[in-house]
Image (tube, rainbow, N blue to C red):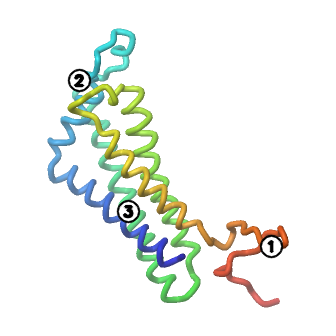
Amino acid sequence: MPLAAALLTATVALHIALIAFGNITDYGTNQQFVRHVLAMDTTFRDPDLMWRAITSHTLQDAAYLAIIAWESLAALVLIAATALWAVGLRRHGALARARLFSTFGLLMVLLLFGAGFLAIGGEWFSMWQSKSWNGLEAATRNLTLAGIALLVVHLGAPNAPRAEASGTEQPAPDAVTTAP
């Protein structure tokens, strides 16, 4: 299971790094996406919802820069986690730090795409109503990939409870035990 966790962590690290790189090198494309979502100018324009719109380009660009910074930081944390998995796999067992870094990085991705894009963008700013500026499908893909990776990172972890035939919980097989 540690090899699968390492490979999934590396996959999400690569994916989020490429997203951040794309947003930095092709800044204008997704800047327009963020501006339209926050302005709510391609939604149904329901007067009961339009008070939520943010039309200030300064605030829209600040939000976009925050997204890029968050993506970049998540990528760096996950790259570090991938390196820690590589070292831990060679040393047969030193995986606690790799798991910790993976958890932090993957939670950052989950927060960005779950809370940021699905909840805030999709619901608060009614992105689901837009035919042209709707990022819910892409956000769901990113959320799913990071969520699966997080589950695999913690499957078989030393502190993960396992039900045995006797009904008692036993430590996972890769748990490190020390002699008295």
Of labels 1 and 3, earlier in sequence is 3
The residue labelled by disc 2 is 42
| Residue type, mark 1 in image | Ala
The residue labelled by disc 3 is 12
| Residue type, mark 3 in image | Val
Asked which secondary structure carries label 3, the reply is helix
Residue at screen point 83% across, 69% down:
168
How many angstroms separate mark 2 from mark 3 (CA)?
31 Å
| Residue type, mark 2 in image | Thr
Q: Quadrant of the C terminus?
A: bottom right
- Give percent across and percent down for residue 4: 47, 74
Asked which secondary structure carries label 2, the reply is loop
The residue labelled by disc 1 is 165
Residue at screen point 26% across, 35% down:
34
**CB atoms at circles 2 and 3 under 8 Å apart?**
no
- Camera-near label (1 vs 2) is 1
Q: Is residue 142 left or right of residue 23?
A: right
Q: Mark 2 Cα within 10 Å, few/some/many (few <14, many 20+)?
A: some
Placement of 104 over or under 67, stated as above or below: below
**CB atoms at circles 1 and 2 under 8 Å apart?**
no
Of labels 1 and 2, earlier in sequence is 2
